[in-house]
Image (spheres, rainbow, N blue to C red):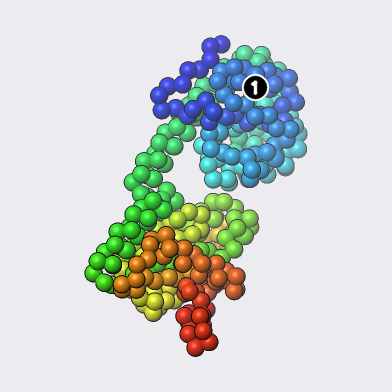
Amino acid sequence: MEPHTLRQGEVSHLERSVLVARPLWPALNQVAGLIGESGYRVENAACWSRLVDPDFPLDGLVGVLLGEYGNTEEEISLLHRFRARRGASGVPVVLMGGRNARQKEGALREAGADLLLMADEAAGTLANHVLPILRLSAMYRSLELRTRDLRDRAGVDDLTGLPNRRQFTNDLQRNLEMARRIGRPLSCIIVDIDDFRNVNERHGQPAGDAVIRQFGETLDRGRRAYDAMARLGGDEFAWILVDADREQALNAAQRVQRLLTQRAYDGEGGPMTVTATFGVASAGPGVDLSADTLVGNADRALYWGKESGKNVIRFYPPKRAVNDDTYHPHLS
């Protein structure tokens, strides 16, 4: 069997990885060897739980081969959890087993397996079934990466459709320069969903993605037409408020905070609510503040808000004197 030669644009050799988990069947070990000879990086794992290990990266994964071992309930649970991981939806999962596996094939396919192979076939025959699937998966993953790169270059976040961090940096620099030139204030707000990790752990990754999308939609609806909103990554968003001083920015944050906390978000077990913390910073007329400093100040205010109870709005700098109320307690 000749090794597969990569074509231009395909996922590179180092990225084309295949996970082989619980290779107790001799045929599975032999197929894994043939896959490695065909140019794929093969990772062996003692058990299926490697599928859901958060330290196991899915970037570049073009296939999973699993040795069926008999605990149907555990196998189905692990397949479901693997399919719930972001980036796993397009990865082919091939099972290899005996007569017992054939009897529960329907349940395993429903849980996320794509193909069942019988372990009593010759390794070469089995490899001929698997390698074309891996080649198609590698091409799909390569196209997916190129599309993601094009969207990133276009300044669009994949999940929410909002501008991404790169576009936000450009927008902030441009607006800050304009604010300096015409002598007007500019404010920046950093927004972060409170305890978002709990959403993923309790409801799963797809529900977490849905919350981020809906959260971004609500934020975007709350901004003025000439403001800029972006997703910086994860559950963190940024908002540029043109011609807005501290008071105007705090009032805008309060208004949008109400919208966010009043909305019901789609969860796996039904509607749920989330809260968010806001960090606000401003550059006044005549103040020579860099973009990095302005964002850094908003980040510091956000951190202060997280440390002081969450679901609050904080302004940077904090109180510098007893009578210098630089944030609004009623906004908390």
Q: How many numbered marks appear?
A: 1
| Foreground residue among 277 and 172 | 172
Q: Can you give x and y, in whole percent of width and height, for residue 197 in the image?
A: 60, 58
Q: Can you give x and y, in whole percent of width and height, for residue 297 in the image?
A: 46, 67
Q: Does residue 278 appear in the picture of this structure? A: no
In the image, residue 15 sits, relative to residue 249, either above or below, namely: above
Query: Which amino acid type is marked by label 1?
Result: Ala
Q: Residue at x 61, y 20 (%)?
A: 36
In the image, residue 66 sits, relative to residue 159, either above or below, namely: above
Residue found at the very far top of the displayed protein:
1
Q: Can you give x and y, in whole percent of width and height, for residue 171 in the image?
A: 33, 57
Q: Which residue is drawn at 42% across and 60% down?
A: 292
Residue at disc 1, secondary structure: helix
| Foreground residue among 89 and 182 | 182
Q: Can you give x and y, in whole percent of width and height, for residue 273 in the image?
A: 54, 68
Residue found at the very far left of the displayed protein:
182
Residue 102 appears left or right of 135? right
Local crowd at mark 1 within 10 Å, few (<14), some, or many (≥20)?
many
Q: Mark 1 points at which residue?
A: 32
Q: Which residue is drawn at 63% across and 57% down?
A: 202
Q: Which residue is drawn at 57% across and 60% down?
A: 196
